[in-house]
Amino acid sequence: NHFAEIVYPYDELRKNGYTIDFVSPFGGSVPLGYFNTSDSIIRQYIYDCEFMSLLAGTKKPRDINPHDYKAIYYGGGGAAMFGIADNSEIQNIAMTIYEENKGVVSAICHGSIGIANLKTKDGKYLVKGKKINGFPDLFENKEADYFKEFEYSVQELLMLRGADFKFSQEGWDGFHEVDERIITGQDPSSAKKVAQLIVQNLKKLKS
């Protein structure tokens, strides 16, 4: 799990008064990586015991009442490629938030694989015909061992589900897409902006 892609949205949402819960397929501690200790925000949260304890004790999907939430955010990192996209409990949380609560579905980088299999009540893929972003094949090393463990790439599965996959060929430039209440970002450079857009959407829903 990419630490910056967790920290930046958490920081932005907390500053705006929102309560955040962390969920993983089995609950408990989640593996973390990609620590840029030269970044002041990253350093701050590495040494934040309250924050780190949340990541050491994530909730199980069954512990969540989806009616209590207005947004779901899928963080990235290689861990997002395993056990997320096909998890029916997490899918139910996401679609309850989106369809019943009229809330926001958001994701970043490899986390965008998590929204690929979401279906609306009429059985259609949520991403079909939507402008969606995530980590593109252009920046994957398809010959590397890590990639060979993936069943699909993020771009491949989203396009297979009918998404209008958009991405920046430059990369690391904050690229993101917004399609109504679906917000997606390309890589860690998009994390803060995605969080800001979540906040903007939530404020519109509240007004």
Image (cartoon, rainbow, N blue to C red):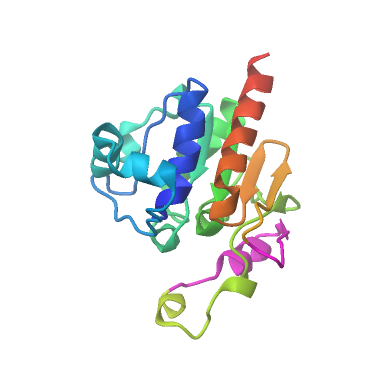
Q: Quadrant of residue 139?
A: bottom right
Q: Position of residue 140 (x, y in %)?
A: 55, 74
Residue 17 part of the magenta segment: no
Taking the image as drawn, is residue 118 in sight? no
Quarter in which the N terminus is drawn:
bottom left
Q: Position of residue 50 (x, y in %)?
A: 26, 32
Taking the image as drawn, is residue 187 in sight? yes
> Is residue 94 found left or right of 124 in the rendered image?
left
Residue at position x 54%, y 38% in the image? 95
> Is residue 98 found left or right of 69 in the rendered image?
right
Boundaries of the magenta span: 150-171
Quarter in which the C terminus is drawn:
top right
Considering every residue shown, the one lying at the far bottom of the view is 143
Considering every residue shown, the one lying at the far top of the view is 207
Where 59 falls versus 4 (above or below)? above
From the viewer's side, name the closer residue of 102 and 20: 20
Where 199 falls versus 106 (above or below)? above
> Is residue 87 found left or right of 26 in the rendered image?
right
Where 82 falls versus 89 (above or below)? below
From the viewer's side, name the closer residue of 117 and 80: 80
Residue at position x 44%, y 80% in the image? 148
Residue at position x 43%, y 57% in the image? 80
> Is residue 143 found left or right of 170 in the rendered image?
left
Q: Position of residue 126 (x, y in %)?
A: 64, 47
Q: Quadrant of residue 45?
A: top left
Residue at position x 66%, y 27% in the image? 200
Where 95 falls versus 200 (above or below)? below
Q: How many marks?
A: 0
Q: Position of residue 4 (x, y in %)?
A: 45, 49
